Amino acid sequence: MSVSFYLVTDTHYYDSSFKAQGEAYERRSRTDQKCVAETPAIIDAGFKQLADDKETDIILIPGDLVYRGEYQSHVGFRERLYKLKEQGKKIYLITARHDYAENPCEFDGDKEIPVKGMDRDDLRDFYKDFGFGDSICEHRKSMSYVAQIADGIRLLALNCDGDCKGFKGIWEDQMEWALEQIKKAHDEGQYIFAMTHYPLLPFSPIMNMIGDAKLTDWQECANKFADAGLDLIFTGHMHAQAVTEYTTPSGSKITDVQTGCFVGCPCAYRKVTFDDDGTVDIKSYTINDFDYDKGGRTAQEYFQWRFDRMITDIIDAMAYDFAFFTRLFGGPEKNKKLKIPITAVGRLLQKLTLKKLSRILCFKVDKSIENRLVKDVGVELVRNIFVGNEPYVKGTPMYDAVEKLLKRLHPVTHIIENKLGDKNPLLSDIDSFVLSMIGDERQRDYNAVLNINWKRYKI
């Protein structure tokens, strides 16, 4: 008999009782991938879609339940969980960094006004009805637990807050406990999989260079988990759609299924089915619509607009920011000698097309893409990393254009490779590093069938 559950992550609920308007909110909003004021409407719509599926009664939520640890946000979010429970849903969750007080506030005009926050120590009991209270074993110190979610299937729910500062990982005693639970499950003929908030595996080459894009000690954890027989983990945090595999030095494999943010681009959630043939079928869905003034946009257009605005602002700042250029060209003194008119550079980048860029650097681009603005392409390539299923594989016009561009820039990138390649192997071949981020031949970040034979432990 097959077993299914939904995976929803990074809900970041912000209670409607809080003010979310004015300069302070807009300033925060423009730098954020996720929506905030919109979360009540988005979550209500998304939870209705989950409730409408009467055949799937299990929901997993791996952390970042609320925006910034506001107590009232937790109250409002828990009310919604109870409504799902009343409709027959069994919910298993863990908490994460955004769920305890981190300068919680509301936004009024140009001010951020402090509001009551949630203490981390109170989270376990506050959410006891959503996994903790039904667990068959707990690691109270870390707020981790094991739950029997179906006949023959157990969930290892691992909180990975670490020291709540720089270390975002699994403590030694927590790891020992987890490995014991994995062995116990297998000895008792149970399949066990895990969920954490932070990704176990870096899902893209560039994520190796971002500190909290994976667990602090990810390789050590991946080796221990996989060699112990844990082959599947569900994660969130990076607001990205990705299915990533890792093989340990001893040949064991583990797959990290990371799911996008529920309240921002890519707005996604997954339905996971443990099929009778032993495979695991993964399908992704999105929230079709929500009751909010979206400026005439569809839900998906709205989420993408929010994401693109954030990346565009960053690119514009880079184009016009004098400090950025002084760092780029070696400091204020060298910049004075170059006499670069920063605003002119910014204006040039705003209008630069792929055709103009190709003429400047003496390479050709396909006519189908030659009129695209370089800035817009940059925004799309960044977005694609998070949305997943990056489309620009070898043979596509965009792949060919980027490949040609990199060849023209090789005299510059070669210097970077020589200087930084020894310290960071990823930068020893910049061409391969960049091209690997724009195209994904496997195209399984949204839908995939994992041949992991989850029935192999069943007695």
Image (cartoon, rainbow, N blue to C red):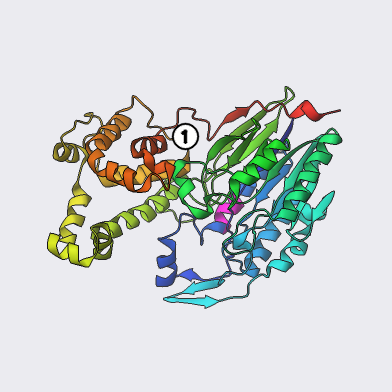
- Looking at the rendered structure, the kind of residue marked 1 is Asn
Compared with 432, 195 (above or below) is below
Compared with 440, 38 (above or below) is below
Residue farthest along the top direction in this orientation: 277
Residue 141 seen in the figure = yes
Q: Position of residue 50 (x, y in %)?
A: 65, 43
Q: Position of residue 210 (x, y in %)?
A: 47, 52
Picture residue at 75% right of the left edge, 55% below the top: 173
Looking at the image, residue 407 sits to the left or right of residue 134; the answer is left
Compared with 248, 200 (above or below) is below
Looking at the image, residue 273 sits to the left or right of residue 125; the answer is left
Residue 230 seen in the figure = no
Label 1 packing within 10 angstroms: few (<14), some (14-19), many (20+): many
Q: Which residues are magenta?
A: 40-45
The residue that disc 1 covers is 389
Q: Position of residue 188 (x, y in %)?
A: 87, 35
Q: Residue 392, located in which quarter of the rendered image?
A: top left
| Foreground of the two, 242 or 334 | 334
Q: Position of residue 229 (x, y in %)?
A: 73, 35
* Most common SS among magenta residues: helix
